[in-house]
Each structure stands twice: as structure tokens, then as C-alpha cells.
Amino acid sequence: MQQTVDYLIKATLFSLLFTQLVHADITLDNVKKRGVIQCGVNTNLPGFATTDDKGYWVGLDIDFCRAVAAAALGDSEKVKFVPLTAKERLTALQSGEIDLLARNTTWTLTRDAGLGLNFIGVNYYDGQGFLVKKSLGIKSALELDGATLCINSGTTTELNVADYFRKNKMDYTPIVFDTPDQTVKGFETGRCDVLTSDQSQLYSQRVKLADPESAIVLPEVISKEPLSPVVRQSDDEWFNIVKWTLFVLINAEELEVTSSNVDEIKRTTINPEIKRLLGTEGEIYKNLNLSSDCAYNVIKMVGNYGEIFSRNIGKDTPLKIERGLNNLWTQGGILYAPPIR
């Protein structure tokens, strides 16, 4: 029996390795031939990945996929969005079903070093929290001893909760669901006292409630959840393209280049940093095997990081999320990108 199990494990690992070798260093070629990027996203997480009333995909992660399409293909609309559950997401990337995963995925050592994946950089600094009904009168997570928790399976949430409750000598009962929507339903119908997830997801899930004002997010943040888009290992060219698309978005905000002023700035600027960013000085983007206007296309078609944040999850949206840690390093946050030079 043990020999059979060992054989199956080895066969699975060999299959994944073979798939990665097949896809090695050819993602950009495949994307260009196909004429579209296949991007794995959340099934329905308002502010990050969802469809509007016309069926058009919107959200922070959606805009990142479009930014990569603008850089690689010169057209931000050349994206096929593939909705994936938390359980499906990493396997879909490993198998080659998608070219890029942009689905609020936490960067951890095991995922980075043990699954044949590369995390390209943090596009949202998050942390796990708790959503409770106001009627319970709970003000702190330290009051949750004996609580029943709704949890989404296939995430880092389960281990974080176990660590937090054990450290604080509290008991809890987990109720695990396969999708975020099922988790929200369980919370709303009273199957659990508390919904726990990354705080960004809690704000997104709260707006799905019949009465969003009936629930509050507790102040405690119990974990570090650096969320990052992900690509397969063994394809450095594609890894660099996706990584530097994120860095273009962040640098553009820092240099105050937006979708509305990029044309004027491109025509008039004497700032060498901006000239390099927009590809009007030097041939820096040849290092990515992309055209000199790739970053211009990203900014013109999608905007900079600040624009993406504001229109999808910022203070003027239903989620009303403050920039906080996701502000630029020059504005009190920790958002930072290597220079384009």
C-alpha cells in the first residue's frame, strides 16, 4: 500500500515538473500567438474581481491582468478571465490552464519554494481579521473564546486562526466552506458567530450582506498577508514582464504620471526618470522583449497604482478602504518599487 502511495506521489510530482518544462520560457510566445492572456481571478470578490451589471469584469486584480495585457500585447482588453476557487487556483497555474494568477493569494515560503511558482511582488498588503455582527456587542477578537467561525477552505486562514486561538488560550469551532459566497451565506444565516478572512475580503464580503451596516470588522489584525500575483517558475522572461508591470504601476504613481496626463507629460517632460518610464529615452524595455511604449500603454489604458486602488476599493467606493500600508513609501505606507533605469 505504501509503495502504491509513494508511486502516486512521484508520478504527480513528475507530471507537474514535465508540465513546467513544457511551458518553460515560452509563455510570452504562447500569449502572442493566442492573442490573449489567460488570467486566473476570484469568482466574486467585490473590489478585487467581480462582474458589473453588464457582465464586465472589474476590480483591483482585474486591472492588474489588464495592465499585463497592455504591456505584453498593447491592448488591455486582450484578457480572458478564468474564475477560480481557492482550491483550484494554484493547480490551474501549475498545469498551464492560465498564464497568470491574480487572485488575492498570500505569498508564503511553501507556495514560493515548494510548488514551482514565482510570486512577482506585493500588490496589496493585507492581514487576517474578523467580521462580527454588531448585535453581539463584541469589540475585540480577544472576546471570541468559544465562538463558531466561518472559514474559506484552501487558504492560509485556517492555520492563522489555529495559531491565534492557541496562543491566546481560547477555543473555537470552525465551519469550513469551499467558496467566499458560501462563507458569507453561512455567516448571514447564523451558522457561525464570526467570519474570518483577510481584511480586504471582509470588507468585500460585508457589502454582500443584506444589511452591510449590521456587521463590523474588529480592529485586530492577526497575520501578515502579502498578496501577490503569481506565475510559474522556469520562465524568467514572463516572470520579469509581469513583475515589472507591477513596478511600472507603482513608479508611475510616485512620479505622478496618470492615465489623464500621460500624453501631455510624455510630450513635454524633461525629467529623465519619467522619460525612462515612458520609453522615450533609451531602449530599456528591450530587456523585457517588449516595445518601448509598453509602460505608456499600461498607464494610458489602465492608470497607475493609485488610480487602480481608488476606483476599485478606495474611500469613494462601497468598500471604503484606506490606503494604510498600501500607500507609497513617500506617503507613510510601505509600497515601494525598484527604479526603472
Image (tube, grey):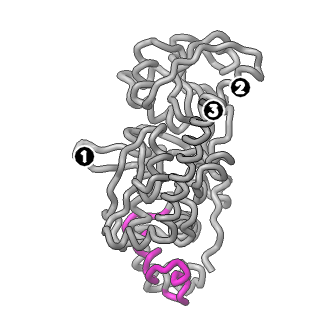
Of badges 1 and 3, the one in the foreground is 3
Q: What SS does tag 3 mark? A: helix
Q: Which of marks 3 and 2 is in front?
A: 3
Q: Where is residue 325 in the image (x, y as percent from the top left)?
A: 64, 48
Label 3 close to label 2 by CB (< 8 Å): no
Where disc 2 sits, the SS reads: helix
Q: Nearer the viewer, residue 78 or 91?
A: 91
Residue type for callout 2: Tyr
**Element under disc 1:** loop
| Residue 28, magenta (yes or no) | no
The span picked out in magenta is 280-304
**Does residue 236 appear in this view?**
yes
Indicate whether 98 appears above or below 35: above
Q: Where on the picture, by quarter, is residue 78?
A: bottom left
- Measured in 3D between alpha carbons, the distance from the residue under mark 2 to the one under mark 1, in whole angstroms, is 39 Å
What residue do we see at 42% from left, 18% from top? 188
Along the viewing direction, whichever of 324 and 66 lies nearer the viewer: 66
Q: Which mark is residue 164?
A: 2
* The stretch drawn in magenta includes residue 290: yes
Task: Give the quadrant of the N terminus.
Answer: top right
Q: Which mark is residue 55?
A: 1
Q: What residue type is labelled 3?
A: Gln
Q: x and y percent of residue 89 in the render?
A: 46, 45
| Residue 158 screen position, x and y as percent | 60, 28
Task: Return the residue at label 3.
Answer: 2
- Within 10 Å of disc 1 (Cα), the crowding (few <14, some 14-19, many 20+) is few
Label 2 vs 1, first from the N-terminus:
1
Nearer the N terminus, badge 1 or badge 3? 3
Q: How crowded is mark 3: few (under 14 residues within 10 Å), some or many (20 or more)?
A: few
Query: Residue drawn at (24%, 42%), measured in percent from left and top?
Result: 53
